[in-house]
Image (cartoon, helix red, strand yellow):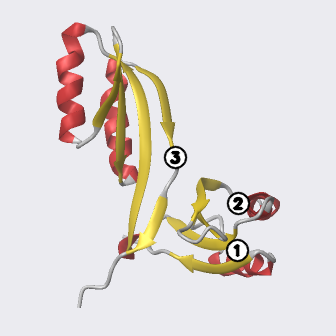
Amino acid sequence: MPPKYHVLSVLVENRAGVLARVSALFARRGYNIYSLAVAPTDDERFSRITVVVDVEQAPLEQVVKQLNKLIHVIKISELDPRDSVERELMLVTVKAPAEVRGQIIELIGVFDGRIIDVGHDELALSLDEHPERLDDLEDLLRPFGIIDLQRTGRVALPKLERS
């Protein structure tokens, strides 16, 4: 099954305003950004921006051409979901009264997540995983009562060669 989204890894100079220029380019073209994550690389002169956009809505060649015109863009790579490793972090606080707390603890264990804070009637949970797996956990936690939820957005790197 072909992917429904493009994952672009954009290496840029680590300067003020670069992220604004990149996101403005997508906005001017009317492309919806599903996910956007940015952080410095191992070399503090550069940052990596991971942008996820809809395949149908954003013709890839046009997007790449426009990004290449931006002065602080160093390199653009499309990361095919079949050939890359993708992760996203989710922090979620759920209602967890005594009578269901054990079920929630068991559920987060099945997903290899962590309990990061405990309240009288709530648990704060953390999970870094493939985005679809986070969707699954979110769906399973919803009946317990999600109080607060934050996701970082997708980050990705190419899979390593296995020869």
First in residue order: circle 2 vs circle 3: 2
Q: Nearer the viewer, mark 2 or mark 3?
A: 3
Quadrant in the picture for residue 106: top left
Answer whether residue 52 is visible to the viewer in this image: no
Left or right of 118 in this view: 11: right
Determine crowd level at label 3: few under 14, some 14-19, many 20+ residues with C-alpha closer than 10 A. Answer: some
Q: In the rendered view, would you say 7 is above or below 143?
A: below
Mark 3, residue position: 152
What is the distance, in whole Å, between disc 2 and disc 3 at their CAs?
Answer: 20 Å
Q: Amino acid at mark 2?
A: Tyr
Quadrant in the picture for residue 159: bottom left
Q: Tell me where residue 111 appears, x and y as whole percent.
A: 24, 42
Q: Tell me where residue 135 appears, x and y as whole percent.
A: 38, 43
Q: In the rendered view, would you say 107 is above or below 18?
A: above
Answer whether residue 96 is visible to the viewer in this image: yes
Q: In which quadrant of the rendered image does the N terminus lie? A: bottom left
Helix, strand or loop at label 2? It is loop
Q: Tell me where residue 52 appears, x and y as whole percent.
A: 56, 61
Q: Nearer the viewer, mark 3 or mark 1?
A: 3
- The answer to whether marks 1 and 2 mark residues whose Cβ atoms lie closer than 8 Å is yes
Mark 1, residue position: 63
First in residue order: circle 1 vs circle 2: 2
Mark 2, residue position: 31
Residue at point 78% right, 57% down? Answer: 20
Residue at point 63% right, 76% down? Answer: 60
Q: In which quadrant of the rendered image does the C terminus lie? A: bottom left
Residue at point 17% right, 20% down? Answer: 102
Question: In the drawing, what numbered circle is on residue 93?
Answer: none
Left or right of 114 in this view: 34: right
Quadrant in the picture for residue 93: top left
- The answer to whether marks 2 and 3 mark residues whose Cβ atoms lie closer than 8 Å is no
